Image (spheres, rainbow, N blue to C red):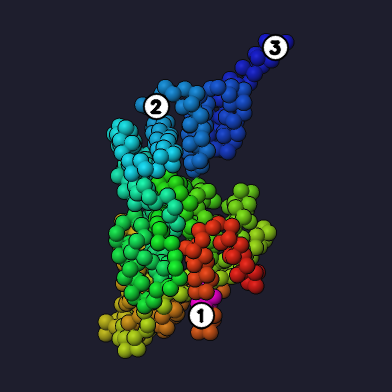
Amino acid sequence: MKDNKSAEAGEQFQQLVPLGESLVKEGKLEEGIAVYTQAIKLQPDNAYLYSRLANFYLQKGDLGAAIANYSKAVELNPRIPSTYDKPRQFFRTYTQLRKAIARQNRESQQNPKQSHQYKLSLQRFKNIPRRLKYILRSKTGQFRIQAKLLYNQLIRARKLNHPAMTNPNSTDLISIGVLDYKNIGYSSENIGDYIQTLACLKHIAPFYDKKWYAWSDEIKNLLGDFQSKIGWKTNVALNPKVSLVRVNRDYSSLAKIEYPRKIWLIMNGWFMHPCVKNHYDFPPPDNIRPIFISFHLNEFTILEQKRVVEYLNKYQPIGCRDWSTVYLLRSVGIEAFFSGCLTLTLDIFSHQQNGQLTYLVDYESYLVDNESTREQLLDSSLVKISHNKRKVAENNIVENIDTALELLGKYSRAKNVITSRLHCYLPCLAMGVPVELYPPSLNDIRFSGLYPLEAEDVKKLQSSLNKKMEIILTAILETNDEAFVYELWNKINQTEI
């Protein structure tokens, strides 16, 4: 009887594998994955099945499932062929790197005095760049992009010099994240993203102290200059041991590898951009302590995932940039309120009344719709500017924040500004610059509650945002106590809910 069952299972297995391959070739990934999952139940120790399933998940864009399945394949058969299979080679390398960094993190925690050697131990993996360079020559763009990111990640890990990791006396640091927008498949070309980061730094700057740690001196110098520009510094006696950590908005999981300590992160901006095709790196890893304010959600289907809803419930109330996000989150039982956008607090420049130029920011159709602007063009009084440039993707975060500051300075000296960009319109309102906004569509959900805004509305939102940011950052830097900070966040927002 037992032999009959084994024979039946073997026969079923022989049918399932070709069926799974056939379904994937037809573009039916979900069905192919389901069939291979069924085959694995019949042969749970078959490394090849896990390897193939990893490849299918990679095609789907689910990196987490792909890594998990290939890790299992390597665990079952460390010698699984990889020289001819680029996806397998990629994940073998990825697995090695993750294990190396995880091991070194554990060693650093067990012996903090030796944590300054963190970057040195990864040199045992000096053969990985050579293997990754081979993958980079792949004609398959998706693998090429992922391998390139991994290669850069390895180089960063081997050259790691963040004082918070290399200084043996820095174990009690308070870490604060600064949002960047570099990604696996792309990097943001929109300077408006960095205007949002600038808005967050504007609130951190009053607390800045030269004793703070950061990934580069450039960001410290920028904060010091920013503090001078704002013209005030908090008098609160704070813990000087603070570390600024760069966190990628759409690939925040990388922060867990590069910087394994707890990180406070202001979650302002447009979330749910895929880090690779069809894969959203959300929720963030468990070392991120999020403060949700000016949060915009555009990928509605993500809320169909139970873990996402549970995550947002854990850190509610959620301060939303627009009313569309408020209604969306409330529809699944999450406490949410309209906070407005943090860029409304970018009043770092004052409007100069004698401006002669009109800036036309990403709104070409205005030239067609308005005859009067043609005369302005002849007088060279109308200057066209775009927030979307390839250079933004190529520059580092500090260079882009400098560009954002330079742009806001231009707008403050303008006669007026005409734009389709939200993060041109809102900072101009904050600085008192005459500005006209022409949304791409009147039904664009991003603008709900943010357009149109009267001067009184701007002042009200500015006051509320400034107050919340000061209260919560003071609590973070005074206590670094997670329970206290979230209890306070809930308390100061109850009237909003």
Question: Where 190 falls versus 433 (above or below)?
Answer: above
Of marks 1 and 2, the one in the foreground: 1
Residue beneath disc 2: 82
The percent coordinates of residue 146 (x first, y second) are 39, 42
Up-down relation of residue 409 to residue 198 (above or below): below
Mark 1: give few (<14), some (14-19) or many (20+) Cα within 10 Å: some
Q: Earlier in the sequence, mark 3 or mark 2?
A: 3
Tell which of 489 and 367 is nearer to you.
Answer: 489
Q: Amino acid at mark 1?
A: Val
- Could you tell me the amino acid type at mark 3? Lys
The local crowd at label 2, few if under 14, some if 14 to 19, many if 20 or more residues have their Cα within 10 Å, is few
Residue 67, above or below 319: above
| Residue 50 in sight here | yes
Dot 3 corresponds to which residue?
2
Q: CA distance from mark 1 to mark 3?
A: 76 Å
Outermost right residue: 1
Q: What residue sits 53% from the left and 48% below the top?
A: 286
Residue receiving disc 1: 458
Do the residues under discs 1 and 3 have CB atoms within 8 angstroms? no
Q: CA distance from mark 1 to mark 2?
A: 58 Å
Q: Residue at x 44, y 65 (%)?
A: 238
- Check if residue 392 falls in the magenta segment: no
Q: Residue at x 34, y 51 (%)?
A: 163
Q: Which label lies toward us, 1 or 3?
A: 1
Foreground pick, 354 / 6: 354
Q: Residues within 10 Å of mark 3 (few under 14, many from 20)?
A: few
Q: Quadrant of the N terminus?
A: top right
- Name the kind of residue labelled 2 in the image: Ser
Question: Which residues make up the magenta segment?
Answer: 461-465
Q: Quadrant of the C terminus?
A: bottom right
Badges 3 and 2: C-beta atoms under 8 Å apart?
no
